[in-house]
Amino acid sequence: MRSTRRQFVAAAGLAALAGCTGSADSGPGGGPTPTAEPSGDESTATADGAVPTAETALPLPMAPEELESLAVSGGPSKDGIPSIDDPSFVGPDDVDFLEPGDPVFGVARNGVVKAYPQKILVQHEIVNDRLGDLPVAVTYCPLTGTVQGFERGRTTFGVSGRLINNNLIMYDRATEAWWPQILATSIPGPWNEAPGTSSLREFRLVWTSWEQWQTVHPKTQVLSTSTGFARNYGRDPYGSYNPPKGYYASENTLFEPLSEDDRFSKKRVFMGARTADGAVAFDKSTLLDEGVMRGELGGTPAVAVADSRFDTGYVYLNPEERAVGLDDGSVRVGDSSYSPDDLPLTRIHTFDAMWFAWHGYYPETNVYA
């Protein structure tokens, strides 16, 4: 272990990290942190029915117990970085805290369009929210540059205060099991010996800029800075993405990664995708330049396509190796054109990740740059 997050912030001379001095049992007004929430979710779930899980579990890089043994304290205690459990939203005309180039995490799902600003999520890491009638958790780990959406069913998720591979370990308040964010798969925690292994139901959040998201979704709702917490949302304790500086622009990590690979700089961003059959990573900058990249995921041909609207990408399985190319802002598959996020192929959940973090969890990943 190189340092705690508290030590990093102190050394950088930045504002105290959210929750570092907070009570593990306190909510927005100093009262108890909200626990399980009623829901009508009927999807596959854990034994007590609280946490919706996927039909097939994602692979772990090692035994769950070994992963648990590698967890380190990030500085704050359990719930020391407080999740937002009662989020409020504003319309674009009321957003005066975002610059055009500031990163936001956008979602259009279940008839709802929302944007979650990185400058708010960096202080809380988890937002327990709803997209229409669907209870969800929006999660962000600043140390690995990963944003993930999960269905949460009848519970809420919190920040455990522990990290594996520099990556956030969430816990659910129904079973107290640990869920490393990138792995999206349960492992035992100190408060619960998780029976078996299961993976969460994931959904895509698009890492993009406020300007790009608002251009495509002019009526989007935006997570408000009125969170119930006294936080300076104008200052990122790790640095800045607009422009890149501090932790995000350096080669330093706060803790040792699970594995080392010097083919690329540690913070280089890849679009990663994984299934029960394997993992694949496409260099994001190369994908945005070329528009289409080809590779393999678990022995099956795959194709990555760029989406210039948001400067992001998507990964699809392409077992028949159908011809995929660019077509004046659209993507052509065979003789027809499609939106980059809606090809007639099997789309695999894809998200941004820093290279060191992706390789640490998936050292045998196929990589294309």
Image: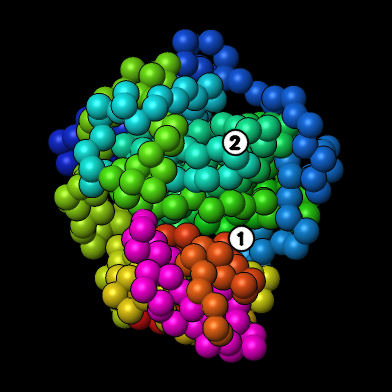
Which image quarter is the N terminus in? bottom left
Residue reaching furthest front? 335
Residue contact at pointers 1 and 2, CB within 8 angstroms: no
Q: How far apart are marks 1 and 2 (CA)?
A: 35 Å
Question: The residue under label 1 is which amino acid type?
Answer: Glu
Q: Nearer the viewer, residue 225 or 47?
A: 225
Q: Nearer the viewer, residue 205 or 46?
A: 205
Which scheme is used to colour this image of the protein?
A: rainbow
Asked if the stretch drawn in magenta spans residue 326, the answer is yes
User: How far from the left and from the top, in percent, is residue 68?
Assistant: 59, 53
Q: How packed is label 1: few (under 14 Cα within 10 Å), some, or many (20 or more)? A: few
x 77%, y 37%: residue: 41
One can see residue 172 in this view: no
In the rendered image of this protein, does residue 165 appear above or below residue 188?
Answer: below
Residue under label 1 = 66
Q: Give how far across and how far down residue 236 sits, in percent.
A: 25, 37
Q: Is mark 1 on a helix, strand or loop?
A: helix
Q: Which residue is drawn at 43% across and 70% down?
A: 330
- Earlier residue among tags 1 and 2: 1
Please, what is the three-letter code of the amino acid marked with disc 2? Leu
Residue 139 visible to the viewer: yes
- Most foreground residue, 336 or 56: 336
Residue beneath disc 2: 131
Q: On the rendered structure, is 93 left or right of 315?
A: left
Q: Is residue 261 magenta?
A: no
Region of the chain picked out in magenta, as a range: 306-333
